[in-house]
Image (cartoon, rainbow, N blue to C red):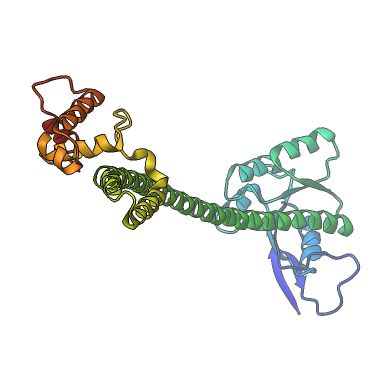
Amino acid sequence: MADTFYINNFQLTRIRRSTAIPSETMTDTRKHMVLVVDDQPANTKILYRFLAGQGLTVHVLESGEEALEMLTHTLPDIILLDVMMPGMNGFVTCQKIKADTRTAAIPVIFLTALDDVEDKVRGFEAGGVDYITKPFQKAEVFARLNTQLALQQAFSEIKILSSNLEDRVRERTFELQQSHEQLEQKTREIEKNNIALRVLVTQYQMAREEFETHMSTRLQKLVFPYLDLLQQKLNGTQEEEYVAIIADHLDFVTESFSKKLTNPGWQLTPREILVADLVKQGKSTKNIGQLLNITARTAERYRNTIRKKIGLTNKKITLHAYLCTAFADD
């Protein structure tokens, strides 16, 4: 089967082959579109036969103006552009193609019979990627086309890979940001919990110390003096041994906080602590003497000693009032 079309009454035929591809072929058999721009029908006929015979889609135009108009609606994969054409020459046409962002990436191969180095340099400066010299050689045409199409395909694949990579980087960056934010949130929660825990520990320690101090003071003021008094009254009896055992047990229980028993600045003896507690309860000197089995004079001497040890020199303040104020929480 064959497709036939005409350029300037010159018949061109594209042959649809079903037989094996000849030795001089395009190595890339994918469907590509090639735009051939040349004002010489003989040249376009040869190129059309070369390219269409390999299954490529070929568009043939005669001028740079026609090529630019076509590119407004159709984008080929590659352009074969004649250098010497009437009107707009190949260099100017190429410059306009490269100036348009829509068409700038399309590779342009110049078709020329010129072999001057300056012309080739001018072509590269205009944006061309290669040259095919006239008269055309099939092997050369296919080799240069294959190279540029392969580069174009590689570039497209790189763009796709780059885009995919950028997408993946954005996704991964977002995931890392999310993880970082979650980590920071957990860190803040841990710090907040640590602060709360430290507060609780501090409160516990303060409460424990307050309890130990309170308990120690109570034992020293309300228990130990009376145990000592009871031992004196039970001197030589079996009950005295029981009282001694109780005192030992209390000493063992309070050993861990025994240093907190009273105000360390006062340095009161157990008997003085007992007298101070009775004074705080409102007992008179006579009552204290009777309770402790001592004379009123001795009880008064204890009271004066206590005043000196606690630093109570103001005679207008009674010992009872001072002790009640000092131990208001007891």
The image quadrant that residue 158 belongs to is: bottom right
Q: Position of residue 80 (x, y in %)?
A: 73, 52
Relative to the observer, which residue lies in front, 49 or 151?
151
Q: Position of residue 111 (x, y in %)?
A: 78, 48
Residue placed furthest toward the right: 23
Q: Is residue 242 left or right of residue 173?
A: left
3 is higher (above) or lower (below) than 159:
below
Q: Quadrant of the C terminus?
A: top left
Seen at 79% across and 59% down, the residue is 47
Q: Position of residue 109 (x, y in %)?
A: 75, 49
77 is higher (above) or lower (below) than 214:
below
Seen at 80% across and 76% down, the residue is 17
Is any atom of residue 88 visible in this view? no
328 is higher (above) or lower (below) than 174:
above
Count of picture labels: 0
Q: Is residue 216 left or right of residue 18?
A: left
Q: Position of residue 304 (x, y in %)?
A: 19, 25
Q: Quadrant of the N terminus?
A: bottom right
Relative to the observer, which residue lies in front, 10 or 92?
92
Relative to the observer, which residue lies in front, 315 or 247?
247
The image quadrant that residue 278 belongs to is: top left
Residue placed furthest toward the front: 236
Relative to the observer, which residue lies in front, 180 or 135?
180
Q: Is residue 127 left or right of residue 102?
A: right
Is any atom of residue 308 visible in this view? yes
